[in-house]
Image (cartoon, grey):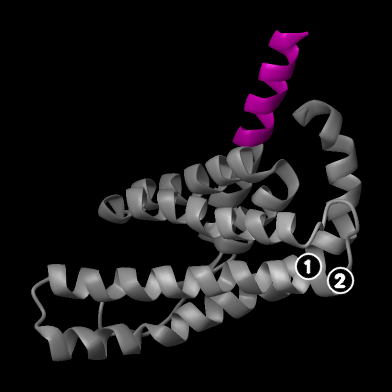
Amino acid sequence: MRTQHTTNTIVLVSFFAAITFVATSIQVPMPALVGKPFVHLGNAAALLSVLLLGYKRGALAGGMGLALFDVTHNYVLDAPYYFFEVFVVGGLASLVIHLLNYRVKPQPFKLVLIILAAITAKFITTTCHNFIMSLVRGLTLQPAILATLSALIPTIVNCVTTMMVVLIVYPVLGERLRNQLSPVLK
């Protein structure tokens, strides 16, 4: 029985990692002074992974999917950062789920608060990351601030996209899938 549970967990984490990888591959390039930002659905898939699989498994799946995308698309230096960022964003989402008692009494406004917490964390961590990477690339303070500001639009668009996708997908599939997955995840 324990082996079956472990196998099911590995399959589910791998499946959601693959979904996150593919969702990150669906992208629209955006202009910025630093890097090559793009709007993608990977953050939404990572957050859905956390909502459906729980914090540890979901963050692992989302982080693996984003990191695998980075490694296979020449963003190797960013892969560890985005792997761990999913744990920060997912951790905050999980904390809000717990504080709002969402699993016991799910309500639409609670889901909105959970997603807002997650995308706020994503916005802050990504903005800090962009600023630090600008400094690492050799920019002085003022150009680094300008470069970071230029990357805010893609970050905001990614956050809004994540909110819209999760608000549409999770209520439709979330509880049904979560109920079917819960025996496997116990």
**Count of marks, rendered view:** 2
Residue 111 is tagged as 1
Q: Position of residue 4 (x, y in %)?
A: 74, 13
Q: Position of residue 59 (x, y in %)?
A: 56, 46
Q: Quadrant of residue 161?
A: bottom right
Query: Counting other residues with Cα less than 10 Å from the Cα at mark 2, is it few (<14), some (14-19), or many (20 or more)?
Result: few
Residue 71 on the magenta span: no
Is any part of residue 39 visible from this angle?
no
Residue 173 is left or right of residue 28, and the answer is right
Residue at 86% over, 62% down: 171
Residue 42 is tagged as none
Is any part of residue 41 visible from this angle?
yes
Quadrant location of the N terminus in the rendered image: top right
Residue 131 is left or right of residue 178, and the answer is left
Task: Please tell me whether residue 160 is drawn above or below residue 8 in the rendered image.
Answer: below
Instruction: Check if mark 2's residue and mark 1's residue have beta carbons within 8 Å.
Output: yes
Residue 96 is left or right of residue 153, and the answer is right
At label 2, which amino acid type do we have?
Pro
Q: Position of residue 173 (x, y in %)?
A: 86, 54
Residue at 51% over, 69% down: 121
At label 1, which amino acid type do we have?
Leu
Q: Secondary structure at mark 1?
A: helix
Q: Which residues are magenta?
A: 1-14
Residue 108 is tagged as 2
Q: Quadrant of residue 37?
A: bottom left
Quadrant location of the C terminus in the rendered image: top right
Residue 3 on the magenta span: yes
For the stretch drawn in magenta, what is the main secondary structure? helix
Task: Please tell me whether residue 121 is drawn above or below residue 16 in the rendered image.
Answer: below
